[in-house]
Amino acid sequence: MLALLFILFAGMAIGCALAVVAQRNPLYSAISLVGVFISLACLYVTLAAPFIAAVQVIVYAGAIMVLVVFVIMLLNVEQEERGRNRLKFLVPTAIVLAGVLIAEVAFMLFSVNNPTPAVSNIGLTSSIGTQLFTRYLLPFEITSILLLMAIVGAMTLARRGGLLSADARVIPGAQQLPRSLVDPRATPDDLRLVETDSTVEAGRLLGIDQRNTQKD
Amino acid sequence: MDTAIDIVLKFAAITVAFVVVLLVVAYTVLAERRVLGFIQGRLGPNRVGYGGVLQPFADLLKFILKEDIVPDKSTRFVYVLAPVIATMAALMTMIVYPFGPEIRIPFTSITIPLVVAHFDIGLLYVLGITSVGVYGIMLAGWSSNNKYSLMGGLRSSAQMISYELALGLSLIGVIMLAGTLDLAQIVDLQSGWHGTRWFILLQPLGFVLYMISAIAETNRVPFDLPEAETELVAGFHTEYSAMKFALFFLAEYINMFTVSMLATTLFLGGWNVPFIDMFLVRGTFLFGLVSALGFLAKVIFFLFMYIWIRGTLPRFRFDQLMNFGWRILLPLALLNIFLTATIIYFFPNF
């Protein structure tokens, strides 16, 4: 019974993994990758590690891949040119890496003689929690700080990249003017913006459309 | 041989659970139309059957008989796949909820649990499957090749990702109190004080945060921006017709049902009916029946709240929605975790 399930889910995982590489459309590749993650989660369940299976689905399939699909949808990569020739130099690298992977699998097959029994309590929630907060506390905390750094870094990069300065606020429906247009004292490379509540007020600040200003 | 019988029994249990869920969902749709009609001073559908009780079946027949259109410029495979993902993900969460305690069938010694599958990680399973459901909506929006659909799909996924955080964090308090992710054990823990030791009394803030994020997570009013008809026609399902549209509709209502059941299980004591243990002995058939009905009543109360809110509140603006989720709900959820942890640390026996 377990062997049957293993063959089913392992086959699904391999099929989806092949599809990730073979598909031309990046969105299909991403969906196939979700399939790989879900099949892996099912394999974890058969290995009596339900917590890891659930986390696999929540983190990889439910969060990371959603963002990947999101980006693919927004960029519409499909219509962009796929620079296949540009990536030719990667083919020998890929062959070498595949060789290393196969060697690793072979090593596992021939050197590990007594695998741990499938039914154990390693994958249960309580044992993972106990281990994380006692034996592996330091790596656990270091990993969370690493993730925090990544988040802060991403936010800093995203905020510096745009035209808006750090103290400019975006209010939908309101008008925004570059400070250099309105304030004669501002330098041209001052990227801060001036907010106005309406188009009329923007016109007044720019010194055009006096008629509406008087009506105000 | 035993595994074969086991598998057959599981399939039977799944079928029963699905039929019950689909019936409740069908009548939730009818109740929504009637109650909204009452709130808005009109009648609502009341012609098919007595007071409109056959309306869901008439609607179903209509959905099946309508022409099924696949837009010419759509990505056909993904277009067909999307409603399947949405409905499947919605239905898959049904199997872990304990609908009631184990009951003994009268005049025999057979006891059956009123839950399809008993998981050590039931709660995480629900959250995981719910997070996969986003793909249905995203892919529907993308594959329709229509700007309204794409905007609806993008909005929806952004909204669901944002509110999933607050939803997950609001449940941490309950998990800390219970010390388990097993839904059946969480319900059992709430059976103290004659069945009134509900976690809503110990986690009021967590409950409010959960309900708000759950409404956002299911794309309902006042957070129904993905299908805001004044801006986006019908959002991600603009191009869908006939049974494919019905599947999205179904998924939305099943998701409502799911989050209502989760709220009942985690905060309102699951199948615990207050003071019932004074009159009936646990393990008897009657006790099981009353408990299961109590569970259903609580779920129906939540479903009614959904409808009531829909008839009362206007829709949020998108930036308000994002600000609310990230700047108010998320810090409050973290505060709730901090408070719960502090209280548990100082009063471990409470």
Image (tube, rainbow, N blue to C red):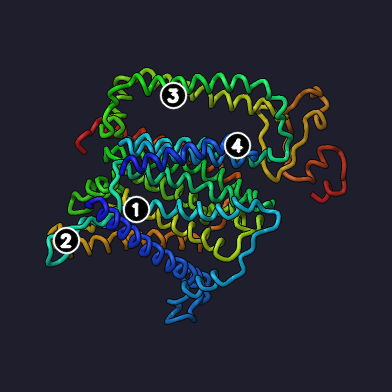
Q: Mark 3 or mark 4, which has the lower sequence index? A: 4
Residue that mark 4 sits on: A22
Disc number at residue B104? 2
Q: Amino acid at mark 3?
A: Ser
Separation of residues labelled 3 and 1 (CA atoms): 33 Å
Residue that mark 1 sits on: B95
- The label nearer to you, 4 versus 1, is 4
Q: Is residue B99 visible?
A: no
Q: Amino acid at mark 1?
A: Ile
Whether discs 3 and 4 lie on one chain: the answer is: yes
Residue A15 location (% of width, % of height):
50, 39
Element type at mark 1:
helix
Separation of residues labelled 1 and 2 (CA atoms): 20 Å
Q: Amino acid at mark 4?
A: Ala
Element type at mark 3:
helix
Residue that mark 3 sits on: A144
Q: Quadrant location of residue B335?
A: top left
**Is B1 or B326 nearer to us in this picture?**
B1
